[in-house]
Image (spheres, grey):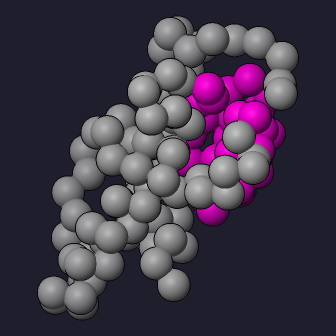
């Protein structure tokens, strides 16, 4: 399966900031990757990508991996494709990620704070 590659070892680094955005760029929710989940900044809940999409008020879309973005501007779907290509080309993930030592300070990142949807 393609999308689980994002949350496996060699995929997205721990504490990577993730943003649920609409196509025109409006940010609905932010959180960070922890284990196989996304921790939402507004409620500190651990959510699957589908739950994060629903929590963002867009559960009817049913395409979380195409609407959750990394800080580099890639969707989780695009990232999964890159990881798959990397694994297919040499059997080892060689996607370059910057080292992330600490969880992001989401409260000061400019995301709207508010009640959950």
Q: Residue at x 52, y 33 (%)?
A: 22
Q: Quadrant of residue 44?
A: top right
The residue located at (48%, 53%) in the rendering is: 66
In the depicted view, which residue is nearer to us: 112 or 99? 112
Quadrant of the drawing holding the C terminus: top right
Whether 38 is drawn above or below 48: the answer is above
Q: Quadrant of residue 4?
A: bottom right
- Give 1 or 91, whichever is nearer the viewer: 1
Residue 13, given in percent of the width and then of the height, sits at: 42, 53
Identify the residue at image location x=33%, y=47%. Answer: 74
Q: Which residues are magenta?
A: 28-57
In this picture, is 27 found above or below 11? above
The quarter of the picture where residue 11 lies is bottom left
> How many numbered markers are drawn?
0
* Image x and y of residue 38, in percent: 64, 47
Residue 78 visible in this rendered orientation of the protein: yes
Residue 49 seen in the figure: no
Q: Residue at x 16, y 88 (%)?
A: 90
Looking at this view, name the residue that lies furthest to the left.
Answer: 89
Q: Examine the rendered structure and indicate whether residue 11 appears above or below residue 108.
A: below
Q: Residue 94: where, in percent of width, then height?
A: 20, 70
Instruction: Residue 59: give x, y in percent of width and height.
Output: 75, 47
The answer to whether 15 appears left or right of 60 in the picture is: left
Taking 103 as reference, is 58 left or right? Answer: right
Judge left or right: residue 96 versus residue 13: left
Is residue 9 located in the magenta-colored stretch of the structure?
no
Residue 72 horizontal side relative to residue 5, left or right:
left
């Amino acid at each position: 399966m393609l999308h689980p590659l994002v949350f496996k070892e060699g995929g997205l680094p721990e504490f990577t900031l993730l943003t649920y955005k609409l196509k025109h760029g409006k940010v609905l929710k932010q959180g960070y990757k922890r284990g196989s989940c996304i921790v939402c900044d507004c409620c500190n809940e651990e959510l699957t990508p589908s739950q994060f999409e629903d929590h963002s008020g867009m559960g009817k879309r049913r395409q979380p991996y195409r609407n959750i973005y990394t800080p580099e501007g890639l969707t989780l779907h695009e990232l999964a494709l890159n990881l798959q290509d990397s694994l297919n080309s040499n059997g080892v993930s060689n996607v370059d990620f910057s080292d992330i030592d600490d969880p992001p300070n989401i409260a000061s990142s400019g995301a709207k704070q508010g009640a959950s949807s």
